[in-house]
Amino acid sequence: MNPLPMIIADLRALRWTAAAIVALVALAVAIGVAIGAQERALRQASARAADDFDLLIGAPGSQTQLVMSAIYLQPEALPLVDGRLLNELVRDPRVAAVAPLAFGDIARGHPVIGTTLAFAGRWGRVQPSEGRLFSREGEAVLGADVTYGLGDKIEPSHAIAGHWPRRGVADAEEASHRHEGHAYVAVGRLPRLGSPFDRAILVPVESVWEVHGLGNGHAGEGAALGPPFDGQRIPGVPALVVKPKAVADAYALRARYRQGGTMAFFPAEVLVGLYRTLGDVGQVLSVASVLNAVLILAAIFLLLVAVTGLRRRRYAVLRALGAPPAYVLLVVWIGMAGLVAAGCLVGLGLGAAATLAVSGLFEAQTGLRLSFALGSAELAQVGLILLLGSLAALIPAALSYRGSITAGLRG
């Protein structure tokens, strides 16, 4: 006998109850999927943004703050590194490239970052999607999401602690701190990097120094951009990005510049600590998700038992008409397990939608591009819920054919 007509008839008769079961399972699955996928996407995006920062050197202070400011462009006043260190690193045979990062200015809410031509092109890895890289002072390269267009005039303003205007808008506070008489011309735009630098404006570090009245680090007029600097006074910078020639050189440089008034570290060192904290929070959320799933499964089990009780007379009629116990068992179990499976599928969709929505909000806030992907952990969690739900459905299914036919008909 084909059990499908009976299963379909049961689901039609109990459509609102069936919808409630699907919704409960979907809620449990969606919460678990969203927590796991979001945490993994955040780890991947933050690590990807730090790929071009092999070694950071800064003045003694908080390593975490230097990472947040240099890589994730979180505004904060930082002590400066002696500018003469730039030439020292350029001459070091262990260094393949070095670039300063000078920040503190904004334009329409976009951070203006002073650096070198080499770092603007990420050591030759990135080519502009429009225009070209800067080649002289007064030129600027735009990140993918910067609201200026090529050829536009960019007037920088001094950023104020605690105030960060909305991107694309120059508010009154920004306008009141504008560097009068100084402007950049946008000559190129970088492709999307999936990092906060997509919202940044990159300019020669010499231009940033001159805007603040510090000279340009070069002795003569018309000198080429970038190191080596030969001015009488080389201004300081908040951070130096160093690209070592080899892994051994990276560790040697790290040890060398952890003394003498500087600190040097691999950004991965800081990220590991942040991931450990994030992992602790993720574990708490995962435990909460598991407890939520257990409570929902318990509620589903009670609901399945109640639904079986409501359909007891129907199943007693089937047995009185000669339906074998296995048939009644299949009708009840397949119907209940099908509802759990449907809830799991709906939950996967809801979890994906929730993750994408939160990722969009996070990207709008930080500039990190989070990519959603279901991992083995999420699939295993969904599989476990499906397995436990299917096993739980066996209990009311077994009760449906073990009871007295007479009692069932009277009920």
Image (cartoon, rainbow, N blue to C red):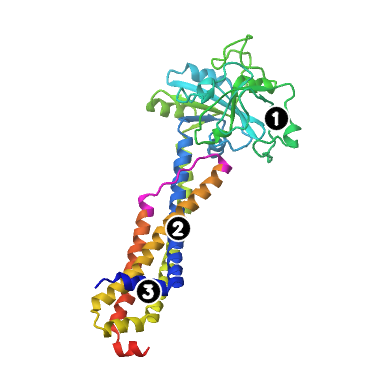
- Do labels 3 and 1 touch, CB within 8 Å? no
Give the secondary structure at mark 1.
strand
Picture quadrant where residue 5 is located: bottom left
For label 3, the crowd category at 10 Å Cα-Cα, with few meaning under 14, some 14 to 19 and many 20 or more, is some
Residue extent of the magenta highlight: 364-378
Amino acid type of the residue that numbered disc 3 sits on in the rendered structure = Asp
Amino acid type of the residue that numbered disc 1 sits on in the rendered structure = Ser
Q: Quadrant of the N terminus?
A: bottom left
Closest to the camera, between mark 1 and mark 2, is 2
Amino acid type of the residue that numbered disc 2 sits on in the rendered structure = Ala
Closest to the camera, between mark 3 and mark 1, is 3
* Residue that carries the numbered disc 2 in the rendered image: 30
Tag 1 or tag 3, which sits nearer the N-term? 3
Q: Quadrant of the C terminus?
A: bottom left
Q: Position of residue 386 (x, y in %)?
A: 35, 63
Give the secondary structure at mark 2.
helix
Closest to the camera, between mark 2 and mark 3, is 3
* Residue that carries the numbered disc 1 in the rendered image: 157
Q: Is residue 145 above or below residue 339?
A: above
| Structural distance between the alpha carbons of marks 2 and 3 | 27 Å
